[in-house]
Image (cartoon, coloured by chain):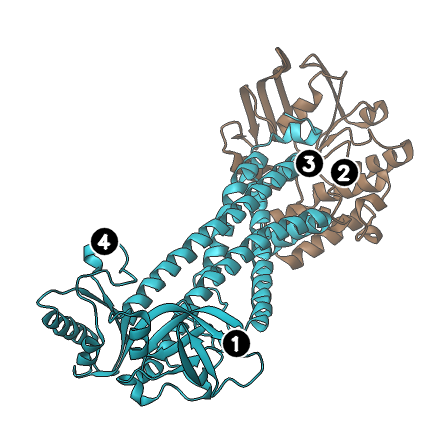
Chain colours: A brown, B cyan
Amino acid sequence: MIKLISINKTYQIGDTPLRALRDVSLNIDSGEYLSVMGPSGSGKSTLLNMIGLLDRPDSGSYLFDNVATEALKEERRARLRGENIGFIFQSFHLINRLTAFENVELPLILTEQPIKSRRQAVAEVLDMVGLSARASHKPNQLSGGQLQRVAIARAIVMRPRLLLADEPTGNLDSASGSEVIEVIERLNRDGITLVAVTHDQNLGDRATRHIRMVDGQIDSDQR
Amino acid sequence: MKLVDQISFNWQIFQRHGLRTFLLLAAVGIGVASVILLTSLGEGARRYVDREFSALGNRVLIVLPGRSETTGGAPPIYGSVPRDLTLEDAYTLEKIPGVLAVAPIVAGTTTVAVDSRSREVITLGSNQSFFTVRKLAVGAGQILPARTREDAMAVCVLGVKLKRELFGNARALGEWVRVGDRRMRVVGVLEERGESLGLDMRDILLIPVRTAEQLFNSPSLFRIMLDIAPSADSDLIQTKIKAVITERHEGEEDITVISQDSMLAAFNSILTTLTLVIAAIASISLLVAGILIMNISLISVSQRRKEIGLLKAIGASSRQIRQLFLGESLLLVSLGSVAGILFAYSLIAFFSSLWPSFPLMPPLWAVPAAVGVAFFSGLTFSIVPAKRAAGLDPVLALRGVQE
């Protein structure tokens, strides 16, 4: 499903160029459960953004379903992203002025789905993450664990095949963290491909494939 | 993104930033309202002049001594030509077919006195036709008698203000007033009426034309006003007037004939131009509103970086982000325009009830022009912020990193 072929990415931070990814090659099959670990600045997040089509490589090739994405126009990449990839972030990134329901509805609105099927899809995923009762609450009325579950609902409402999680438990206490892990693992069991970048050894260990990054390179890849 | 979804998305932003939205709406609204209000002042002035002229009379020609061509400027106010325009000239014009009435006018200023009260006033010498041509009527007493056509009678008609100044609330009819070194009997007082053709008819003294000739010791007429038949050919009559006067003045055409239509056309074009200029000036406030929108939008883009990054992450394209921000400005301008139009029309209604005599009303093009400029300005100044939003790097934006 995902094939990275010697990807390079360099950021200019101030005067010094930072090589975030060096010749990274990686294959991920459908339905896999990966954890990406490593020290800060090792290129984990860059790798995730690259897989999520948020970033373009300087050199190398990225095939998503055998389509070379690095040459695609921005519009096309946005559509590919919207339809196939769901994101969850450490800091949730929910829009404060919108209710939980409206936050989850956003991806459907962007793709102009009819109101009726929108309502149904949102209700379904909110039920899946166990937040049906909180649908009309705004983010400031929800706990951290609930916020991340709303974010997960938003990430999966388009029925993506790939779920990218950037430190999904980083801002949560261990109880809420476990809840969140439980939800995304259930999604993985149902067939979604899951890539989680984390510092959380507990979450890292639960994955079926462990990638460790150091200095922009894949240091180890264990199943 | 569907239109209705986009509007509701933008609306939620407006709700969230109520004060900011209100101020921007006010800026656009005031801009639109000022264009409409100021142009309706200009248009009102045009309509006012139009109405004054129509009130003056159906079709009036004015004959002035002197030729406008020879002086290069405006027609001379007082005749400064070798041959005066005389009363005899005026009465000859009565024979031209289509001329209904001829009012010769001698003008000057005199001191009018009653007992110890005296007043310097504009004094017009004329005859009965003057009342016909200028559509004047007396509020009390009579107009100048028919005999004043030839006789230097010692009678006069007062403007209402003049009457009040001289007699207060006492009866003026039948009383004697001193005009210069003469005594005249008051036979009438004009009815209350405002300015007409730049002359305050309330503060004026009307005396027989022959009396005025003697009083000012000159046979020279200030001007002649003619009332012509509705069916008559104005141009033809003007030509005939010139021919008659030229013949009487030994072959020299030393008069100017002005028609009411041409004066009206001149006023119309001046006031229409004025209204356009006012509109252009008022539009500046809309440009200012546009700059304000741009400023706020730029702030908004940097405040909402994370949101923009998120929208991109969940599949929004750059085009959609751009549309979202442009749409926000357009919605703002639409609401502001509606508010401005409502505000302007309610103010116009209010002032119209205060001064019913002034026809305050925006020209037809004012509303579309105001709204058009508002949209143009709103759109133009939103392009930069919208582009900036669309061009944000989602990775950096999500982290909240400022570029």
Q: Residue at x 32, y 78 (%)?
A: B211
Q: Which chain does the numbered disc 1 sit on?
A: B
Q: Position of residue B349 (x, y in %)?
A: 57, 70
Q: Which one is in front, A209 or A164?
A: A164
| Mark 2 lies on residue | A189
| Mark 4 lies on residue | B72
| Mark 1 lies on residue | B115
Q: Is residue B216 left or right of residue A98?
A: left
Q: Position of residue A133 (x, y in %)?
A: 84, 53
Cα gap from disc 3 to disc 4, whole angstroms: 66 Å
- Give the residue type that dot 4 points to: Gly
Cα gap from disc 1 to disc 4, whole angstroms: 46 Å
Q: Is residue B159 left or right of residue A209?
A: left
| Mark 3 lies on residue | B303
Q: Secondary structure at mark 1?
A: loop
Q: Residue at x 56, y 66 (%)?
A: B348
Name which quarter of the figure residue B169 lies in: bottom right
Q: Position of residue B156 (x, y in %)?
A: 40, 81
Mark 3 Cα shell of 10 Å, populated few (<14), some (14-19), many (≥20): few
- Give the residue type that dot 1 points to: Asp
